[in-house]
Amino acid sequence: MRHRIAYGVAGLLAMCVLAAAHAQAPVPPPDVPKVTVNASASASIANDRLQAWVRAESEQPDPTAAANQVNAAIAKGLARAKAIPGITVATSGYSTQPITEKGRATRWRVTQTITVTGSDFGVVAALLTRMQEQDGLLLSGMSFSLTSNARDQAERTLIQQAVRSWQMRAQISASALGFDSWRAGHVNVQSNDGARVYATMRAQPQAAAEFSPVSVEAGVTEVTITVSGDALLEGPGKR
């Protein structure tokens, strides 16, 4: 009998707790009508950074002799580039590869690359010409892009344009759907990557190379800002 009373009291308490929890559960807010709006702004910005790759190559029966020749050419190129203000230079891509004939290595090819970066295209072009003519280096390729300052400046202007366009489209959409006003919900602002413009050079054997002055044409980079997000609609108007 006591057990039955205890079980009954426990069940009654559990029901009371569940009822209280249900009564205190928050009421979910009503769904807010919204419309997704997209807008963008773009501009073609003149590239202001040039990056070029020059390499030293040597192919000889003795790998040490080939390495010494490449190291000497790279050292001359580095010294020349470092002496010019505004030029950034770095080495990369050192490789030694055997050239085999009938299953055995008969010669060795050693290659190393220098990366040259600058914003004064005339200075960089003159440097590349001298590195080929006087240092025995070969131009592998060039690319043009925007410096961080140029991109940031362009993006600041484009963000303002894209946001104003987004707001205008949100207002037009709200009015067309019969609402008096709107407010911004979750909104994303994104920029494109701004792919580099490459000017690739075809490889030539060093002995046959006849170097003329390097010509550059920087071109432009398309910078785009995209704004996308929800406009929360309020105050339905009379139709």
Image (spheres, helix red, strand yellow):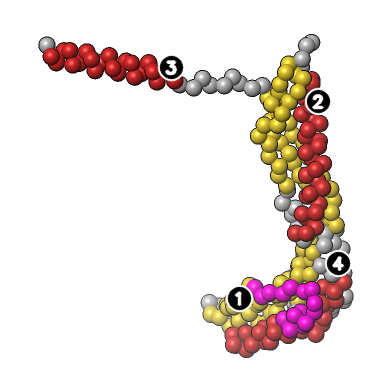
Disc number placed over residue 23 in the picture, else none? 3
Q: Residue at x 85, y 62 (%)?
A: 218
Secondary structure of the residue carrying tag 3 is helix
Residue under label 1: 95
Quarter of the image where one finds residue 61:
bottom right
Q: Residue at x 65, y 77 (%)?
A: 111
Q: Closer to the N terminus: mark 4 or mark 1?
A: 1
Give the percent coordinates (x, y) of residue 196.
Answer: 76, 58
Q: Closer to the N terminus: mark 1 or mark 2?
A: 1
Q: Residue 89 lies in magenta, yes or no?
A: yes
Residue under label 4: 216
Q: Which amino acid, mark 4?
A: Val
Quarter of the image where one finds residue 58:
bottom right
**Callout 4: few (<14), some (14-19), or many (20+) C-alpha neighbours within 10 Å?**
some
Residue 185 in view (yes/no)? yes
Give the percent coordinates (x, y) of residue 176.
Answer: 79, 20
Nearest to the observer: residue 98 or residue 1: 1
Q: Closer to the N terminus: mark 4 or mark 3?
A: 3
Up the image or down, 131 lies above or below 144; here it is below
Residue under label 2: 172
Nearest to the observer: residue 57 or residue 18: 18
Asked whether, in this view, residue 184 is left or right of residue 22, the answer is right
Q: CA distance from mark 1 to mark 3?
A: 74 Å
Q: Which amino acid, mark 2?
A: Ile
